[in-house]
Amino acid sequence: AQSVTQLGSHVSVSEGALVLLRCNYSSSVPPYLFWYVQYPNQGLQLLLKYTSAATLVKGINGFEAEFKKSETSFHLTKPSAHMSDAAEYFCAVSDTGGFKTIFGAGTRLFVKA
Amino acid sequence: DAGVTQSPTHLIKTRGQHVTLRCSPISGHKSVSWYQQVLGQGPQFIFQYYEKEERGRGNFPDRFSARQFPNYSSELNVNALLLGDSALYLCASSLALQNTGELFFGEGSRLTVL
């Protein structure tokens, strides 16, 4: 069965600092991987997705993620945090049959002024 | 264009009652999925419907049921509510059957069971 593990339920950075949110996946076949963001009292919004084209994926709002098969990782990064980046971030994988998307537990990002 | 819309946005029920949640997908999307998000956790898959047929079911009891209508809107029904059913219920629509692309989420229906 496919799964994702997000390391760190909370991450705090200063405005302008590097953002690094960690995600490791488990999959017996090449996965489809996603990062979603959830702002308070809202649904989830896709930041970026990996579908086996390029290993470095660029998303919206300056975020990017790198697929590393050898490490089974798909970490999310942003060079310079902005106050508006404060939200909950979810790593997700599409299951083998493609009928459901499996989400990690989430990482809440705090941005300090 | 309208996004995914869900109703009601908030509701309070008591244990043993029944609830119906509604979802309208983005125009042209034929797939609707339902997720349960308990506070502090990631969304958990409940159902996927495509072309009015159930295509996938998560690990939820039979108290949970759903259906999709000819206009692709969907209902999620939960019977005999338990305290543990308190959660944000998210509906997501997509173009295709298989989740290799983006899921478009509504803002959810927040259910509180007392």
Image: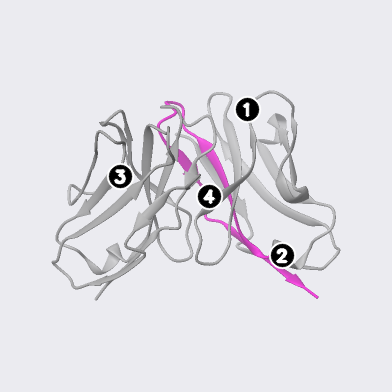
Q: Which residue is mark 4?
A: A104
Q: Nearer the viewer, residue B65 or B31?
A: B31
Q: Disc 1 vs disc 2: which is toward the camera?
A: 2
Q: Is residue B42 above or below residue A10?
A: above
Spatial separation of the CA atoms under disc 4 and disc 2: 22 Å
Please name the residue shown 84% across and 58% down the image.
Answer: A80
Q: Disc 4 vs disc 2: which is toward the camera?
A: 2
> What's the amino acid at mark 4?
Gly
- Element type where label 3 sits in the image: loop
**Callout 4: few (<14), some (14-19), or many (20+) C-alpha neighbours within 10 Å?**
many
- Element type where label 4 sits in the image: loop
> What's the amino acid at mark 3?
Asn
Please name the residue shown 50% across and 66% down the image.
Answer: A41
Q: Which range of residues does the magenta coloring cover?
A: A86-113
> Do the residues at pointers 3 and 4 share their chain?
no
Q: Which label sits on residue B59?
A: 3
Q: Which label sits on residue A84?
A: 2
Spatial separation of the CA atoms under disc 1 and disc 2: 27 Å
Is residue B64 located in the magenta-colored stretch of the structure?
A: no
Spatial separation of the CA atoms under disc 4 and disc 1: 18 Å
Q: Which residue is mark 1?
A: A51
Q: Do the residues under discs 3 and 4 have CB atoms within 8 angstroms?
A: no
**Callout 1: few (<14), some (14-19), or many (20+) C-alpha neighbours within 10 Å?**
some
> Do the residues at pointers 4 and 2 share their chain?
yes
Side of A23 relative to A14 (left or right)? left
- Element type where label 2 sits in the image: helix
